[in-house]
Image: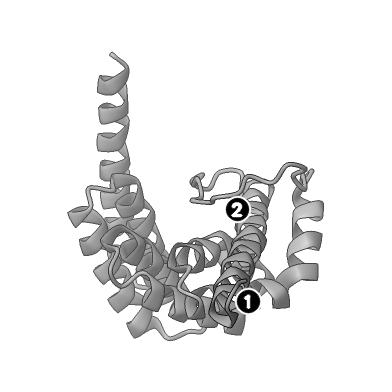
Amino acid sequence: GPTPRDVLDRYTELTGRTLTRLLDHFLDTANQATRPMSPAARKYEVDITYRPESRLVLRDYDHAVEWLETERQTLVAAVALSLDGDWRTHTWQLARALTFFCMVRGHTRDWATINERALEAAKDNPMALAITTKNYAMVFWQTARYADAIHYNERAIEMLREQGDLQGVAGTLNNLSLVYRTLERHAEAAELLEQAITVARELGDRHLESQA
């Protein structure tokens, strides 16, 4: 018959699968919620194992916000759980999906917490670390820690350039411009916006070339 060890291994496997399904559901739905909340924002795909058979469909902005507000504490807990359980991709992708929501709804403490966990989860994945650093930078903007906001945005720009992510570079230059505008350093803000436009134009040219 099965030994206690066999039973324990089976239990661990089942628990792992159940938790993966749960985290997949949260990540898939949170990522979906970013789209009606911010239609112009960059659309990311998520890395999940289990595509839900009956997917919760968030119809519009109000429905997305309602779901996110209802599940907010659970989602923040899921970020912590995923890091503790070594579902590191879920950790940083959930934090990424929740960033815009936390920013516009003023959930600054949650935003800081999930991004700190995401930085830990992403430390061995340069692209994930670059994206997370970009998002983390704006926590400091929202909490008026402008020197930190500048520092993390500048780091994110370097990291995203290294990864060849021009869309990320343009977005981060735009964010950094916003920090300088908040500080009423308008000349620097304008220069950064110019740089963002130049990068976006380069990106557009590359896109056109790839279509040619």
Q: Quadrant of residue 70?
A: bottom right
Q: Quadrant of residue 136?
A: bottom left
The Cα–Cα distance between marks 1 and 2, rounded to whole angstroms, is 14 Å
Residue at 35%, 46% in the rendered image: 167
Q: Residue furthest left?
A: 162
Bin the neighbour count of mark 2 within 10 Å (Cα to Cα): few under 14, some 14-19, many 20 and up: many
Instruction: Report whether residue 181 is seen.
Output: no
Q: Residue 9 versus residue 153: which sits nearer the camera? A: 9
Residue at 60%, 62% in the rendered image: 17
Residue at 21%, 63% in the rendered image: 158
**Height in image: 103 above or below 174?**
below
Q: Residue 48 versus residue 211: which sits nearer the camera? A: 48
Q: Which element is circle 2 on?
A: helix
Q: Residue 32 versus residue 13: which sits nearer the camera? A: 13
Instruction: Report whether residue 122 is seen.
Output: yes
- Residue located beneath label 1 in the image: 76
Q: Which element is circle 1 on?
A: helix
- Residue located beneath label 2 in the image: 31
Q: Position of residue 93 (x, y in %)?
A: 49, 61
Q: Position of residue 51 (x, y in %)?
A: 63, 45
